[in-house]
Amino acid sequence: MTNPPNNAAAGRASAAGPVITCQQLTKRFGDFVAVNGISFEVAAGEIFGFLGANGAGKTTAMRMLCGLLGPTEGAATVAGCDVFREPERIKQHIGYMSQKFSLYEDLTVRENIRFYGGVYGLKTAAIREKTTALLQRLGLAAERDTLVGSLPLGWKQKLAFSVALLHEPAVIFLDEPTGGVDPITRRQFWDLIYEAAARGVTIFITTHYMDEAEYCDRVSIMVDGRIDALDTPAGLKRQFGVASMDEVFLHLARGAKNVE
Ligand SMILES: Nc1ncnc2c1ncn2[C@@H]1O[C@H](COP(=O)(O)OP(=O)(O)OP(=O)(O)O)[C@@H](O)[C@H]1O
């Protein structure tokens, strides 16, 4: 597997324009400010890491960008859709996968793909074609009639990721997608991420694994609702004068107040 050069996303940005834009996006719950005026842009095909300690505000920000939670203030667009005015339209252009991914354990691999193809409104012929291609790409053809519940976790994660891309969304939001698997299995999952990014899919990923942070084109780090740092992994390490993303993260998270 080859890691794309960090300037690859910048090149794609100028060609296609940003796929996610966010200006002073804010979410308050009563008096508590969970997301406090965050601003950034993400390019088409960029792999954007969204890091922060527990309680920093990542999930809240991601829910706003997915059109699931109304922002309090600021502005944001995802795939050209306004998060305030067009939250329903956003859902047609995004994929979403979380640690508690949505595959049905008591359906087979093939049935899950067919089910989600139907949910996304794909035609029967397209579902059939995509199922064959997907099973082949994942090396799961022999397991097509196996219940998802009996697959190893790493396979479930790869399948959930591929299913979330069935409708060819512009952006995929990944909320800690690789929890609970070893670094080698995580690395295999990242092969799929790179393939999707190379096809132009924008990847927005939260993770607590610093090896994954290193794989991103750029990484933002949230502290108490704010984005305190945003750069390439190499740029962040340079900025903080440290050798690893672990140290960058610890440096920033140490000062946090809202750690859960
Ligand atoms: N509906 C809500 N009402 C009140 N407070 C909330 C609500 N949702 C989230 N919060 C608070 O907002 C803050 C940010 O939470 P959020 O879940 O976005 O953090 P996070 O960075 O995603 O953390 P984790 O890594 O644990 O998922 C937390 O203090 C949380 O308790």
Image: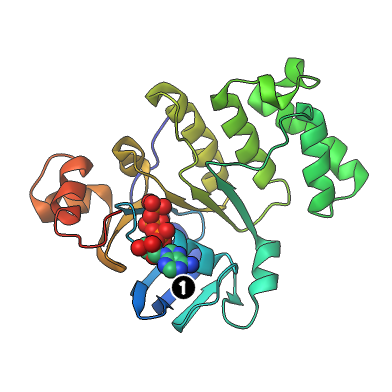
Q: Residue at x 45, y 58 (%)?
A: 59
Q: Residue at x 43, y 29 (%)?
A: 187
Q: Residue furthest front?
A: 30
Figure check: 46 above or below 78: above
Label 1 amino acid? Thr
Q: Residue furthest right?
A: 124
Tell me: 42 left or right of 251: right
Q: Residue furthest top?
A: 142
Q: Residue at x 57, y 42 (%)?
A: 100
Percent of width and height locating residue 240: 11, 53
Q: Residue at x 49, y 27 (%)?
A: 188
Q: Quadrant of ligand 1?
A: bottom left
Q: Callout 1 environment at 10 Å: few (<14), some (14 to 19), or many (20+)?
A: many
Tell me: 82 left or right of 146: left
* Residue 237 visible somewhere in the drawing: yes
For the N terminus, give its image quadrant. top left
Q: Secondary structure at mark 1?
A: strand
Tell me: 39 left or right of 119: left
Percent of width and height locating residue 149: 68, 25
* Residue 10 visible somewhere in the drawing: no
Figure check: 247 above or below 90: above
Which residue, given by chain and number where applicable, does mark 1 sit on? 21
The colour scheme applied to this rendered structure is rainbow
Percent of width and height locating residue 185: 46, 24
